[in-house]
Amino acid sequence: MSLTSILSAEAIESAVKDCQEPNSFSYKKFFELCGLTSKTPQEVKDVFNILDEDNSGFIEEAELKFFLQRFVPGARTLTEAEARTFVSAADDDDDGKIGAEGLFSVVFLLGLLSRSPIMAAVSQEKQYTPSLLSFFVYNPSFGPREGEEEKKILFYHPSEVEKNEKIRNVGLCEAIVQFTRTFCPTKPAKSLHTQKNRQFFFEPEDNFWIVMIVRNPMVEKPNKDGKPPTVEYQEEEVLDTVYGAVLRQCYSMYKLFNGTFGRAMEAGGVSLLIQKLEKFFYRYLQTLHLQSCDLLDVFGGISFFPLDKMTYLKIQSFVNRVEESLSLVKYTAFLYNDQLIWSGLEQDDMRILYKYLTTSLFPRHSEPELAGRDSALRPEVAGNLLHYGRFLTGPANLKDPEAKFRFPKIFVHTEDGYEELHLIVYKAMSAAVCFMISASVELIRDFCERLDALVGPQLTLLASDICEQFTLNRRISGPDKEPQFKFIYFNHMNLAEKSTIHMRKTASVSLTSVHPDLMKILGDINCDFARVDEDEEVIVKAMTDYWVVGKKSDQRELYVILNQKNANLIEVNEEVKRLCATQFNNIFFLD
């Protein structure tokens, strides 16, 4: 049993995000936000049993420091004052420990309070995050005459919208695009701002337009005397750079699995293109969580796994041996812990494939990391070779006589266009390898069995070596300490990104260790950087007394958040220089 089987992942994210700052944890508010106060007594006790990792029947004050990390790995530890307050509230026999009954008493009382008239009045204020209102693809050349407007529309979400409204909305967007062309023919409109929503336009191919309309976040406040609630729209919270990047990602993901719009037109005309658009976007738009989008979506970067030279050479040797033994393999990519180590693809192809793997495929097949090679947890198989390999795409079980040997197909760049490939993703422990094979080749059982027999044992041992080496390096470097700064780094040349701000970033969750207002400042600085080509630096003092620093230099961007209330500009600048010297000592930043 896991916490997400009792509490929703969104509620847990909201509760942890609310108490990111030190000394901001309130057990009352936390239990309300995560939804525990609305659970049954048995469900509350089930939560306690999950939190009680050593099964002692109690949670002591020392253990409570890691309370938030039980909900989200990577969350901050509670301060001593926070832990002491928590214990004193739920310790029903003054033994310095929290038992299941003590936790239940606190949660039960909070549940009653939340139903009182005073608490109910406060809780009636509703906050709404950005949400997708509509998404459509159109081509103005497909319905040039009056009465043929519907022919322009190739895809429209939501599909249940009445036909005339679809035509009206598409026509309005077409008029906006044409109107802005009169001012600058080479730079068509990218977005339109209104109080209630934001519209984003993107022309990925000639005359093919994709439009995404986002409802702005808003707060609904109740009024007295039965009047309708007051709605306050927070349109300044929506950043064009972030959601413009999300729209471009939508097209890139479509193109990865279907090729260009033009290719579908050549193969089967408008009807085939409409069929492909409906099949892809019907499912993809369900995975679009706009409230979780932030600066990392603008970068669309790749997180690289740090390795020593010898382990990297082992991986390089493994890739070479497999490609030599399985001559059908054209391209290979190697990942560990959802981070890239090796890729034979072009950067732009690997960037969107990495996005698909880490936000869609891997989360659906997540499994715990296993121990080292000599662990008693790992059984042996014939020949003393350990084999934990399995296909993430293709056959779920090779021994099944009814197994299907169908693999997803992707399109990658070549010198003269695009190439269609089978995508085989094979995983052992926390290591995953992508093998790409020409789609013209039929993949049969014999090939998959050969690949499994060859790759499975080698990848299992290699994954174990990587795990042991990484653990050893961490032990040598000492325990992780809570730094005085948080940072995001991105390199435009190799697409490398690193964030100590994000504790978890998936398609549906963006859990950061800083307040959303600070993330908004980072986005604003990034917008400033995008307007100019020159290297520059921006330093901002936030209302919360944090310092935010943005540094753009030599195709690299660095964003730092410092918790130094009484520092001045000179001291902040020196602190950033020290950060660059320790964290990026092999990277050149202009002063």
Image (tube, helix red, strand yellow):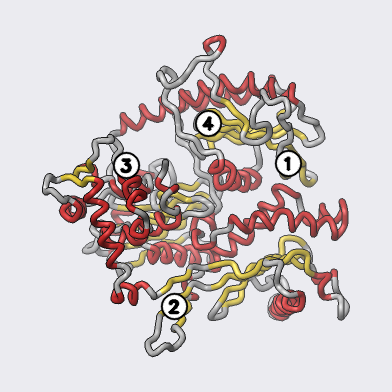
Question: Which mark is drawn over residue 49?
Answer: 3
Answer with mark 4 or mark 1, whichever residue precedes in sequence.
Answer: 1
- Contact, CB < 8 Å: mark 2 with mark 4? no
- Is the residue 159 above or below the residue 88 in the image? below
**477 to the left or right of 193:** left
Answer with mark 2 or mark 3, whichever residue precedes in sequence.
Answer: 3
Q: Residues within 10 Å of mark 4 (few under 14, many from 20)?
A: many
Tag 2: residue type? Glu
Answer with mark 3 or mark 1, whichever residue precedes in sequence.
Answer: 3
Q: Quadrant of the N terminus?
A: top left
**395 to the left or right of 417:** left
**Viewer-closest of 377 and 505:** 377
Q: Which residue is mark 1?
A: 409
Q: Position of residue 585 (x, y in %)?
A: 38, 42
Q: Residues within 10 Å of mark 2 (few under 14, many from 20)?
A: some
Residue furthest toward the top? 383
Answer with mark 2 or mark 4, whichever residue precedes in sequence.
Answer: 2
